Amino acid sequence: MNETITTIVGNVVDAPTKRTLESGVSVTSFRVASTARRFDRVTNRWTDGDSLFLKVTCWRALSENTSACVVKGDPVIVTGRLFSRTYEVVDGKRASYEIEATAIGFDLNRGRGDFKRVSATRA
Amino acid sequence: MNETITTIVGNVVDAPTKRTLESGVSVTSFRVASTARRFDRVTNRWTDGDSLFLKVTCWRALSENTSACVVKGDPVIVTGRLFSRTYEVVDGKRASYEIEATAIGFDLNRGRGDFKRVSATRA
Amino acid sequence: MNETITTIVGNVVDAPTKRTLESGVSVTSFRVASTARRFDRVTNRWTDGDSLFLKVTCWRALSENTSACVVKGDPVIVTGRLFSRTYEVVDGKRASYEIEATAIGFDLNRGRGDFKRVSATRA
Amino acid sequence: MNETITTIVGNVVDAPTKRTLESGVSVTSFRVASTARRFDRVTNRWTDGDSLFLKVTCWRALSENTSACVVKGDPVIVTGRLFSRTYEVVDGKRASYEIEATAIGFDLNRGRGDFKRVSATRA
C-alpha cells in the first residue's frame, strides 16, 4: 500500500550482475538510463530532454531470466516500485534510488526477438 | 500534456493484427488481459484479484516489430497513454478504452529470449 | 501484485455519490474526465488531444472526505488501481472500467484551498 | 516522449520555497516523503516498508497556488516526470533525483478542505 510504481524505458548501461543469497534466492541488479525527447518549437526539431539514471533490482525467476539474456546496451522497459535509501556520510546524509522491478522486457521499438517460456524456478 | 500514462503487465489474448495505412504508416493492435494477485489473510494464500482487459495499439517501428514476434498467449509489459472513445448507440452512449503503446516487451518473469536490434524503418 | 496503477488528472463530471454498506463501510463514486493537450506543429498551437472518462470509487476515510468536499466540476488528481468488469448483454459481452482510488486531491494548478486533517474514522 | 511519469503519495517534509525567475516565472520546491505499508504475514500486521524521499519542483500557476497553501507536514499527492541530475564531486559522481510536478493536491485520505478556483496567472 502506498507504493510508488514507476515505469522506465531506456538502455541498460552496465552488465547485469547476479548474486545468490544464502537462502538460495537469486537477485540481479543493473543500471538503466532513459533520456526524454522534447519537441523544440524554436528549431522545429526533437532534442534530448532530461535524463534519468536508476539502479534496478529483480528477484527470483525475473532475476534468473534477466541475467541469462539481458546485456549491457540493451533497450528495456522496467516497471516496479521506486524507493530510496538514506545513509550517513562524514559530511551529512545522502540517498540512493532504486527500482525493485516487477517486470522487465526488451523494448520492441528497437528490435525483435524470440521468446520461450521457462517453467517457474523454485529460486 | 495531461496524458494518462499506464503500464499493464499481462497476456496477449488474441493474435496481433497489423494494418498499413494509405500513408504507409504501420499500425498493430491486440488485446491484453492482466489479473492482479492478492494475498488472502483468511486462507493465507495468494488468490486472483480483479482483472483488466485493454486494447493496445502501436505504430511504426513498434508496430512492425510487435507484429513480427508477439503471438497470442505471450506474457508482455505494455506502457503507453490510456484514453477512451465515446460513441452513440441506439440506447445511449458507450465507451471503449485503449492504450496507445510507447513501448512493449516480453515479460522476463515468464521466459527468456534473444533480442536483435532492427534499424529504424521509415514507416 | 500485478496491479495496474494509474493516475488521472481531470474534472469531476457528476456529483459524487456516497453509500454506506451494511457492514458500515463507506464507499463513494463519481466520474472523471481528462483531456490531453497536444502541441500542433502545423498551427503552432496547443489543441485538445484524446479524452479519458473513468469511473472512480473510493472507500472508508477517503470516501467520507471526498463526499464531504468534492463537487461536480472540481479539478482533481486521482491515483489508484485500474480494472475492468466484463458482463454479458443480449448481443455479446461488454466491459466497464474503473479506478479504485488510493488517493484523491484537488488539483492545485487550478485553485487554492484550506486543508484540515480529520482523525481516521472507523468506517 | 519517453518521460518517466511517477505519482508519489506522502508528506511534505519541509516548507515549500518559492522563487521568481528574472523572466517573471514562479517556481516552488519542497521535499516529499512516502512510506509504503506492507502486510506482514508472520505477525499478521501492517508494518512500514521502504521509504521514498524526493524533491518536487513546480512552475507557474501550480507554483503560485502550492506556495500559497501547502505547508510542512501536509499529506499530498504529486504527479509528474521523474529525472536525475549527475554532478561531479571530488571523489566521483553523484546524482540527485527530482519530480517536476504536473499536478499536486492535498490527500483526501487524511483530511478535508475548501477549494476555490483561481484564474490562471500570466506567470
Image: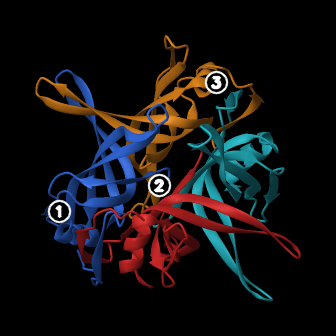
Chain colours: A orange, B cyan, C red, D blue
> Can residue B7 be spotted in the picture?
yes
Q: Earlier in the sequence, mark 2 or mark 3?
A: 2
Quarter in which the C terminus of chain C is drawn: bottom left
Residue C7, relative to residue D85: is it above or below? below
Residue D69 shown left or right of residue D10 in the figure: left
**Distance between mark 1 and mark 3 Cα atoms:** 46 Å
Instruction: Name which residue lies at 28% across and 69% down.
Output: D62
Chain under numbered label 1 = D
Query: In the image, residue A13 lies at what x, y percent?
Result: 46, 27
The residue where tag 2 is placed is A46
Q: Nearer the viewer, residue B74 or B42?
A: B42
> Is there CB contact under 8 Å for labels 1 and 3?
no
Q: Nearer the viewer, residue B29 or A37?
A: B29
The residue where tag 1 is placed is D71
Do the dots labelled 1 and 3 sit on one chain?
Answer: no
Task: Say which element carries label 3.
Answer: helix
Query: In the image, residue D19 lies at what x, y percent?
Result: 14, 62
| Dot label at residue A64 | none
Within 10 Å of the Cα at label 2, are there few (<14), some (14-19), or many (20+) other Cα atoms?
Answer: few
Q: Amino acid at mark 2?
A: Trp
**Distance between mark 2 and mark 1 Cα atoms:** 38 Å
Residue at the extreme left: A91
Do the dots labelled 2 and 1 sit on one chain?
Answer: no
The residue where tag 3 is placed is A65
Quarter in which the N terminus of chain C is drawn: top right
Task: Say which element carries label 1.
Answer: loop
Instruction: Look at discs 2 and 1 and give the one toward the viewer.
Output: 1
Instruction: Look at discs 2 and 3 and give the one toward the viewer.
Output: 3
Within 10 Å of the Cα at label 3, are there few (<14), some (14-19), or many (20+) other Cα atoms?
Answer: many
Chain under numbered label 3 = A
Task: Say which element carries label 2.
Answer: strand
